[in-house]
């Protein structure tokens, strides 16, 4: 049966998967959600014998029902290939008494590669299937990792352009260099004098701008999104939860059917939402442990039922989680509201006007499977040091937040169920904060010198992604004010300047 996608805010016709991927965000500002969550057709035992690519096919075919088998298999084959530095794509390692699911073995060494290496193929296939004549303009806001992963995926892909906005002073030096050295005639990278929320808000406004849409249309363009608001980002992320469980089973670490916790370092709520979908598809997941840094808006939300972004934005050592408006939470709100789009739309209106909303007691009861907590900057650094000292294993700061939160959970609950900690980035992306956490005397050193030092102390080879940018030329210099994003887009696309 074909799955349809509708907006969490309820207006407009339902769309096929390929059209939802092409469009990115619904016209009413809502996010596309499937009209039901499909159930896995294979047992976990069967998954335990499958490769990552086979698992991806079995999971994704249930959501992308209008793609043919040949189309989907071809997308998967093109995405999960030797660009990953390990054949298993997403290794599950047991270190310092915990299981870490390493999602950073792709070309840009962060978990965003898991979805962004396939999204361009899904999108180009969707354009073909729907006979789209226009050029697709991927408009992306990044908190640090999506930008590079999307640039790497879309660079020189015919029929696409990609524009990335990042917070000029809110990403790590390596993250910034990865983006501003990006090659490709269809790429543009723009620093904004604002934070990630400003970038994401600006992008969402352009999606909803009817005047801009008309101009784009006249010029032969159509916007789409590479952010996790695009359902084409979310679906590939479900795969590795199925795969992680199957790996535990294959290795004899768990019994068939044994429930496990997953611990996810969270920003925009995309990764943990994928875990929630995996659970609803039948993966025996128990608690969904949502780990935040000092921007702990989600921790407060799970504790009180009130989502309140009115607070200072903190720049932390885990910049990809420096987010106060977690876009994908809207998909969960819609679901716990009983798929009541009007109720969800009202809450999102309150968020826009007052910066906060409170869910009903009935809705809050449905969040019992989530557990939220956070780690301070000191706790995060201490966790990096502790894991390194106990096992020689070096965590990146995002993963360290998750690891610290998991220890808080275990201490509070005394619960001995197994847990998978999702490891979202390579420590090589954050050499400054990682090495400083291990030894304060590294403070202030050059990020590339620190990469060599990190390799020496951890015994892990420096990834190609670091070597590549070390001597690369900076190709992108544009910086703009946060209220100049639209002008900047018009200039890059050669659209007539409009009244802003
Ligand atoms: C994007 C990112 C996160 C947050 O993921 P969400 O899906 O936005 O919650 C965590 N860690 C790293 C390294 C990231 O790049």
Image (spheres, rainbow, N blue to C red):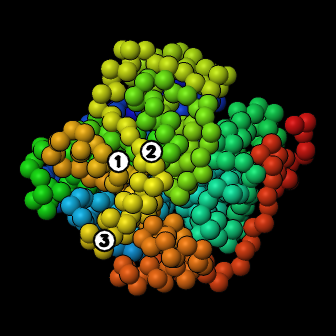
Circle 1 SS class = helix
Front residue of 199/295: it is: 295
Q: Residue at x 31, y 71 (%)?
A: 389
Is residue 382 found left or right of 349 in the rendered image?
A: left
Q: Disc 1, disc 2: CB below 8 Å?
A: yes
Q: Residue at x 51, y 49 (%)?
A: 321
Circle 2 SS class = strand
Residue placed under numbered mark 1 in the picture: 405
| Quadrant in the picture for the C terminus | top right
Circle 3 SS class = helix
The dot on residue 82 is none
Front residue of 103/236: it is: 103
**Can residue 164 be seen from the camera position used here?**
no
Front residue of 332/70: it is: 332
Residue placed under numbered mark 3 in the picture: 389
Q: At which x and y percent is residue 186?
A: 71, 63
Distance in Å between CA atoms under marks 2 and 3: 24 Å
- Between label 1 and label 3, give the one nearer the viewer: 3
Is residue 153 found left or right of 70 in the rendered image?
A: right
Instruction: Tell me if residue 453 comes above or below residue 435 in the rendering.
Output: below
Mark 1 sits near ligand 1, with its Cβ under 8 Å away:
no
The dot on residue 292 is 2
- Badge 2: few (under 14), some or many (20 or more) residues near its Cα, within 10 Å? many
| Quadrant in the picture for the N terminus | top left
Q: Earlier in the sequence, mark 1 or mark 2?
A: 2
Instruction: Tell me if residue 387 comes above or below residue 64 in the rendering.
Output: below
Q: Earlier in the sequence, mark 1 or mark 3?
A: 3
Distance in Å between CA atoms under marks 1 and 3: 19 Å
């Amino acid at each position: 049966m074909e799955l349809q996608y509708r907006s969490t805010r309820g207006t407009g016709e339902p769309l096929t998967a390929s059209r939802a991927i092409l469009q990115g965000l619904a016209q009413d500002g809502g996010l596309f959600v499937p009209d039901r969550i499909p159930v896995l057709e294979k047992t976990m035992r069967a998954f335990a014998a499958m490769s990552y690519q086979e698992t991806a096919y079995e999971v994704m075919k249930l959501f992308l029902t209008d793609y043919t088998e040949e189309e989907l298999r071809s997308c998967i084959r093109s995405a999960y290939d030797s660009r990953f530095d390990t054949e298993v794509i997403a290794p599950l390692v047991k270190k310092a008494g915990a299981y870490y699911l390493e999602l950073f073995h792709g070309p840009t060494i962060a978990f965003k590669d898991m979805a962004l290496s396939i999204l361009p193929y899904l999108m180009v296939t969707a354009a073909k299937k729907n006979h789209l004549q226009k050029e697709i303009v991927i408009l992306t806001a990044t908190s640090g990792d999506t930008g590079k992963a999307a640039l790497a995926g879309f660079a020189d892909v015919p029929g696409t352009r990609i524009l990335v906005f990042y917070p000029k002073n809110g990403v790590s030096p390596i993250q910034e260099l990865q983006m501003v050295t990006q090659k490709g005639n269809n790429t543009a990278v723009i620093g904004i004098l604002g934070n990630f929320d400003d970038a994401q808000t600006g992008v969402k406004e352009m999606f909803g701008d009817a005047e801009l849409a008309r101009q784009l249309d006249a010029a032969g363009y159509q916007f789409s999104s590479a952010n996790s608001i695009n359902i084409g980002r979310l679906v590939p992320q479900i795969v590795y939860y199925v795969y992680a469980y199957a790996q535990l089973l294959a290795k004899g670490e768990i019994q068939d059917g044994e429930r496990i916790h997953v611990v996810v370092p969270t920003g925009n709520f995309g990764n943990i939402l994928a875990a929630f979908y995996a659970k609803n598809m039948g993966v025996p997941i128990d608690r969904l442990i949502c780990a935040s840094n000092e921007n702990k808006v989600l921790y407060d939300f799970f504790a009180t039922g009130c989502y309140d972004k009115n607070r200072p934005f903190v720049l932390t050592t885990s910049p990809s989680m420096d987010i106060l408006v977690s876009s994908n939470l809207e998909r969960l709100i819609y679901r716990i509201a009983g798929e009541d789009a009007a109720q969800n739309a009202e809450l999102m209106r309150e968020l826009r006007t007052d910066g906060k909303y409170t869910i009903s007691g009935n809705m809050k009861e449905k969040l019992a499977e989530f557990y939220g907590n956070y780690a301070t900057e000191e706790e995060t650094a201490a966790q990096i040091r502790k894991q390194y000292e106990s096992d020689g294993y070096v965590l990146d700061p995002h993963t360290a937040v998750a690891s610290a939160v998991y220890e808080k959970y275990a201490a509070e609950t005394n619960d001995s169920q197994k847990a998978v900690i999702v490891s979202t980035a390579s420590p090589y992306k954050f050499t400054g904060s990682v090495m400083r956490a291990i030894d304060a005397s590294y403070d202030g050193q050059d990020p590339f010198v620190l990469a060599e030092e990190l390799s020496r102390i951890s015994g892990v080879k420096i990834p190609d992604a670091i070597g590549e940018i070390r001597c690369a030329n900076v190709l992108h210099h544009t910086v703009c004010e946060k209220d100049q994003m639209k002008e900047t887009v018009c200039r890059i696309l050669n659209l007539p300047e409009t009244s802003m």
